[in-house]
Image (cartoon, rainbow, N blue to C red):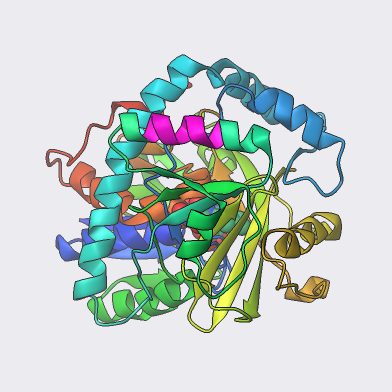
Amino acid sequence: MRVGILGGGIIGLSSAYYLQRAGHQVTIIDQDDLQIGCSTGNAGMIVPSHLIPLASPGMISKGIRWMFNSTSPFYVKPRWSGDLIKWGYHFYQHANKEHVAKAAIALKEISLFSKSIYQQWAKELPFDFEYHERGLLMLYQTKEAEHEESETAHFANKHGIEAHILNSSEVQNLEPHVKVQARGGVFFPGDAHLTPQLLMSQLIPYLKHQGVVFKTKSTLTDFIVESQKIRELVSSTERFSFDEVILASGSWSGAISKKLNVNLPMQAGKGYSLLTPIQKNIQVPSIFLEARVAVTPMGNNIRFGGTMEIAGVNHSINMNRVKGIVDSIPKYYPEMSIPMPLQSNVWHGLRPCSPDGLPYIGRSKQIKNLTIATGHAMMGLSLGPGTGKLVQQIIDQNQTSISMEAFNPERYN
Ligand SMILES: Cc1cc2nc3c(=O)[nH]c(=O)nc-3n(C[C@H](O)[C@H](O)[C@H](O)COP(=O)(O)OP(=O)(O)OC[C@H]3O[C@@H](n4cnc5c(N)ncnc54)[C@H](O)[C@@H]3O)c2cc1C
């Protein structure tokens, strides 16, 4: 079949990988040149440990507290937007224990599935993307964070995800080359990391070589729909006709799906990252819990990433929040500090956030030749290959490798 994929981030590329291998004629359409998108500058963590979605008990009160701090890691920009109000309402409805219990089962299944594909890719793909299985350390300095993270560790162990609660010297033992200042931490040995810019920049030419067609700098503007099927895609550069269409347009997917009368509540969660040369040899990727900053060793560099600004699809850089990231570094690694970067050296990405923290993956009932694969929020890199394989199974009407119920893309219709 001729399959058109809207969006060339990790979800679009992973879908293309499996669809092309299954014998389809695949075209990726993207408004950008695929150099600096959300799938490139992220923290590179592969996180089966992340069982708890953002919509969880306590998040609303924490979010309100953080809204009044200009350097805080989480921020919802108050604005009159019907989409934001509806999204916030759905978020509120899901921020409870019952939802967390259900979501954890679904997230664990898709995370482990996707990680198993990364293990396979690391062996089979003809290029290296620095995939390492060294776990993840969640570092905390306050009693409050210790309590919260210990609960998370118990929750993870109960769900079969290994987690160890460590005191400060046990944390230090895991990082022999850098002084760590923490009350303690939780270690998730099953997590992994990779260098996303290496993965993305090599996967694109690899797919081209396999026959996938890339139409970049081509913005989807409209659809021609007939008898509940997309007959044509209208872009800024040309018109396309496909048998099957995959919507993998990240944070833009909500606005695009509106053109098809499909309701996909979505908010962009902006985050920033900084790549700096290695100062100290950090072994294990970490998250500074109080600051919500992710630290990942990537070759000869270290990436620091963080913040979640729900402020619409825009590309402004809030240097106050970047300062929050920079200031957190010597608090946790007292021998390390980095200068405040120029605004032009700060990377930003827009995480596609569904209100319940679960991705949208599945075939649309309203538009018969549309499959949706988006809304992976903080876990898109982790869940990319798994999602790509599921998309191919859906298109080929194969039995899916995991249960898909929780990811129904039309659950808000
Ligand atoms: C600071 C930060 C750190 C992160 N760290 C991690 C991490 O450690 N681990 C993890 O798993 N995830 C992480 N993430 C999240 C992850 O990066 C995202 O979930 C993931 O990149 C989303 O991939 P995607 O393919 O859905 O979207 P994108 O990568 O945004 O791709 C969507 C594509 O669609 C294109 N598009 C949109 N509209 C149109 C249109 N109208 N026409 C044509 N093309 C269009 C866009 O140009 C874009 O290229 C992080 C994110 C941030 C911001």
**On screen, residue 228 above or below 274:** above
* Residue located 79% across and 61% down the image: 327
- Position of 201 with respect to 66 (left or right) is left
Q: In the figure, residue 306 lies in which quadrant?
A: bottom right
**x, y percentage for residue 236?**
58, 62
**On screen, residue 175 above or below 4:** below
Which one is nearer the viewer's eye here, 132 or 128? 132
- Position of 100 with respect to 189 (left or right) is right
Give the tally of numbered discs. Answer: 0
**x, y percentage for residue 407?**
36, 32
Numbered range of the magenta stretch = 148-156
Residue 249 makes an appearance in the image: no
Q: Where the N terminus falls, by quadrant?
A: bottom left
Instruction: Give the overall secondary structure of the magenta segment.
Output: helix
Q: Residue furthest front?
A: 169
Q: In the figure, residue 242 lies in which quadrant?
A: bottom left
* Residue located 48% across and 41% down the image: 375
Q: Residue furthest left?
A: 398
**x, y percentage for residue 238?**
49, 65
Asked whether 54 falls inside the magenta stretch, the response is no
Which one is nearer the viewer's eye here, 397 or 312? 312
Residue 309 makes an appearance in the image: yes
Which one is nearer the viewer's eye here, 302 or 27? 302
Asked whether 154 falls inside the magenta stretch, the response is yes
* Residue located 53% across and 72% down the image: 282
**x, y percentage for residue 198?**
44, 77
- Position of 28 with respect to 255 (left or right) is left
